[in-house]
């Protein structure tokens, strides 16, 4: 074979088979046949269903115990506080710890914390302070579990399937929110009173976390990436690096502000809806659950559209360049 023939071969396009596998249809098929991802996704879906159950049960039970919307709001704030206080710090520690173990401990911890609510109620010793403490612990577990899950995703699926995997997670989370709200409303509506129904929701929520944690024991792949053999930096140094990275990423700063504002103004809506429905409109909890589920349908539609839009709308990606403080762009 001549040199010219060899050169012409090297310039030929790559074999079309790998390119065909990179299509949207191929990515979805790859995800659905990925055993470890589907196990993690199934556990995530079950735990999301449990979290949605508590979204209605927490304010209903807090109102039943205290009779005060203010106290119910404080319990809800205790549940959301870890998201504000621990997100960045949790990421630093998760880089050092075994992510699967973190997720299992978070699920088992949430199971144990939530299980104390029905037990305390059975012994007539449940207080609003106990409810707030459990709400805070549930929030802590969710922060560590969610960040570990996101960090581990790149080890479970190829890079060309990450967007589809995230979209599938969003669909599952949104659908679980709809189903969990409706199920919690049914449990509360069928019980002899709303407080007992909320206790039932807590019990089911606790079991979902136990199922989620147990499912992780069947995952074969490692959730970790190779770590540098250099001497590890301190927690404070990593925290400063993370804050510097966030500060110098204009797009991330914008997203952080937007998400913070949305969560700040959206957080009281569930409680306001429940108080208005129960005290002013005399609507039962079952119908309230359906109302919250209907609200969640919009989120499901958005999650379903996200992957479709990504395939058809070109978005610029940003990377951090220390020399230019993250303002360089690449197509």
Image (spheres, rainbow, N blue to C red):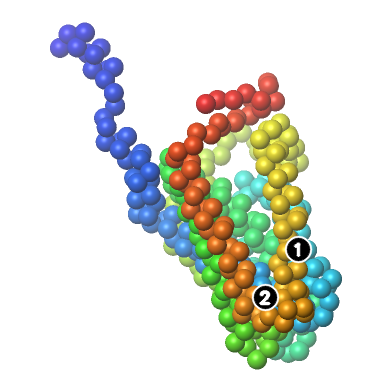
Q: Nearer the viewer, mark 2 or mark 1?
A: 1
Q: Nearer the viewer, residue 115 or 183?
A: 183
Image spot of residue 289 (x, y percent): 62, 74
Count the numbered circles shown: 2
Question: In the displayed structure, does residue 12 sit left or right of residue 92?
Answer: left
Classify residue 68 by image quadrant.
Answer: bottom right
In the depicted structure, whether residue 112 falls above or below residue 64: above
Give the labeled residue for mark 2: 57
The label shown at residue 268 is 1
Q: Secondary structure at mark 2?
A: helix
Residue sitting at 51 percent across and 56 percent down? Answer: 301
Asked whether residue 174 appears in the rendered view, the answer is: no
SS for callout 1: helix
For disc 1, the neighbor class at 10 Å (few under 14, some 14 to 19, many from 20) is few
- Residue 139 falls in image quadrant: bottom right
Q: Is residue 36 left or right of 5 when viewed as pictured?
A: right
Residue at the left extreme of this rendering: 1
Q: CA distance from mark 2 to mark 1?
A: 15 Å
Name the residue located 66 percent from the left edge and 25 percent from the top edge: 327
Residue 265 appears at what percent x and percent y?
Answer: 75, 56
Residue 52: image location, x then y, percent: 61, 68
Percent x, y of residue 63: 77, 78
Q: Quadrant of the N terminus?
A: top left
The answer to whether residue 55 of the structure is visible from this angle is yes
Q: Is residue 326 found left or right of 164 in the rendered image?
A: right
């Amino acid at each position: 074979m001549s040199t010219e023939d060899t050169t012409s071969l090297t310039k030929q396009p790559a074999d079309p088979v790998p390119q065909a596998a990179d299509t949207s249809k191929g990515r979805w098929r790859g995800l659905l046949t990925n055993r470890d991802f589907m196990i993690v996704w199934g556990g995530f879906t079950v735990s999301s269903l449990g979290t949605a159950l508590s979204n209605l049960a927490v304010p209903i039970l807090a109102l039943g115990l205290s009779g005060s919307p203010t106290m119910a709001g404080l319990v809800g704030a205790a549940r959301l506080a870890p998201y504000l206080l621990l997100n960045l710090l949790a990421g630093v520690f998760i880089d050092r710890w075994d992510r699967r173990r973190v997720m299992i401990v978070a699920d088992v911890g949430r199971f144990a914390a939530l299980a104390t609510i029905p037990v305390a109620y059975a012994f007539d010793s449940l207080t609003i302070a106990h409810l707030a403490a459990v709400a805070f612990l549930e929030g802590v577990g969710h922060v560590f579990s969610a960040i570990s899950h996101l960090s581990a995703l790149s080890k479970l699926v190829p890079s060309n399937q990450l967007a589809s995997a995230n979209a599938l997670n969003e669909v599952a989370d949104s659908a679980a929110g709809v189903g969990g709200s409706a199920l919690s409303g049914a449990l509360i509506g069928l019980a002899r009173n709303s407080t007992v129904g909320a206790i039932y929701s807590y019990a089911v929520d606790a079991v979902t976390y136990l199922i989620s944690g147990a499912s992780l024991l069947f995952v074969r792949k490692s959730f970790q990436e190779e770590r540098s053999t250099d001497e590890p930096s301190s927690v404070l140094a990593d925290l400063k690096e993370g804050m510097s990275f966030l500060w110098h990423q204009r797009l991330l700063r914008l997203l952080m502000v937007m998400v913070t504002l949305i969560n700040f103004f959206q957080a009281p809506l569930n409680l306001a809806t429940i108080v208005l429905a129960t005290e002013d409109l005399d609507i039962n909890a079952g119908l309230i659950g359906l109302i919250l589920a209907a609200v969640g349908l919009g989120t499901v539609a958005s999650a379903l559209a996200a992957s479709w839009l990504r395939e058809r709308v070109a978005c610029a990606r940003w990377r951090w360049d220390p020399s230019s403080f993250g303002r360089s762009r690449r197509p």
